[in-house]
Image: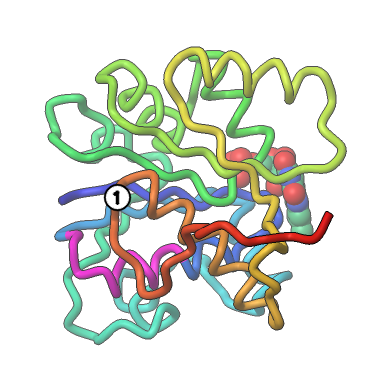
Amino acid sequence: MELTVAITGASGTIYAYRTLQLLAESRTIETINLIISGTAVTVAQVEMGVNLKEATTQSINKWLGLGDSSKLIRLWRLDNLAAKPSSGSNKQEGMIVVPCSMGTLGAIASGAGTNLIHRAADVCLKEGRRLVLVPRETPYNAIHLENMLRLSHAGARILPASPGFYHRPKTIDELVDHLCFRILDQFDIPHSNKSEWAGEEVND
Ligand SMILES: Cc1cc2nc3c(=O)[nH]c(=O)nc-3n(C[C@H](O)[C@H](O)[C@H](O)COP(=O)(O)O)c2cc1C
C-alpha cells in the first residue's frame, strides 16, 4: 500500500508525528509520500521543538524513531509539482492531511491549489481516492464551514482534530493516539490498540 501524508501549519504537529509512527508500526504500508508545508515547519518548531527545515529522509526517520535505513518515508518538496503524488497515474490508496490548516483546506476546496499538497489532494478527489483531512481551528468561521461542506460533497472525509474523552485518557499521548487510530481506521489500517467502542451500561 502507498499513501501520501501532508503536514500543514495548523496546530497539532503531534498528530502528524503519531500518525506517521502508527503507519510505520502497522507494517502495511510500503511507501509514505511525505510533504511538509512551510508553516508546518514553524509550528513543528513551536510545538515540538523539532527543526524540519530542509528536512531529509534521514532526519525525518530520526525524528520518528525509524531506523536509518528505513525506506518507508519518501520526502517530496512542496514546490515539486512533478512529484509522484502529483499524478493520478500513480496508483496509491489516498492521502491524509494532518493537521490541516484552514489555508490548505480553502485551497483544496477552491480547486485552485498552488503547491504539491493542494495538487495531491486534488488528484485524490478527481480519482475517487480517499482523502482524509484533519482540520484544526477554533472557532470556525462560515468560510471554514462552507469549505468543509464543499469538500465533503466532493468526497473528502473530514476528521476534525477534536479528540474524545469517553475512553478516559490519562495522558496527552492517549488523547492524541485515540484520534490517530480514527485516522488509520479510515483506511482499515490495523493499529495496536482497539479503539472501537463496545458499548457500556449506564445508569438512568
Ligand atoms: C504556531 C502557529 C499555529 C497555528 N495554528 C493554526 C491552526 O490551528 N489552524 C489554522 O488553520 N491555522 C493555524 N496557523 C496559521 C497557518 O499556519 C497559516 O494560515 C498558514 O498560512 C497555513 O499555510 P499551510 O496550509 O500552507 O501550512 C498557525 C500558525 C502558527 C505559526
Highlighted magenta segment, given as a residue range:
19-29
Identify which residue, 79 or 3, lies in the foreground. Answer: 3
Q: For the residue with label 1, is its CB less than 8 Å from the closest atom of ligand 1? A: no
Residue holding disc 1: 188
Residue at point 24%, 34% (across, down):
82
Residue 1 picture location, percent across and down: 15, 51
The vertical placement of 158 against 199, above or below, is above
Q: Does the magenta stretch include residue 23?
A: yes
Residue 68 picture location, percent across and down: 24, 85
Identify which residue, 188 or 79, lies in the foreground. Answer: 188
Is 96 on the left or on the right of 135, as rendered? left
The vertical placement of 30 against 39, above or below, is below
Q: How crowded is mark 1: few (under 14 residues within 10 Å), some or many (20 or more)?
A: few
Is 73 on the left or on the right of 191, as rendered? left
The vertical placement of 185 against 171, above or below, is above
Residue 95 picture location, percent across and down: 36, 41
The vertical placement of 84 against 157, above or below, is below
Is residue 42 visible in the rendered image? The answer is: no
Three-letter residue code for mark 1: Asp
Is residue 142 visible in the rendered image? The answer is: yes
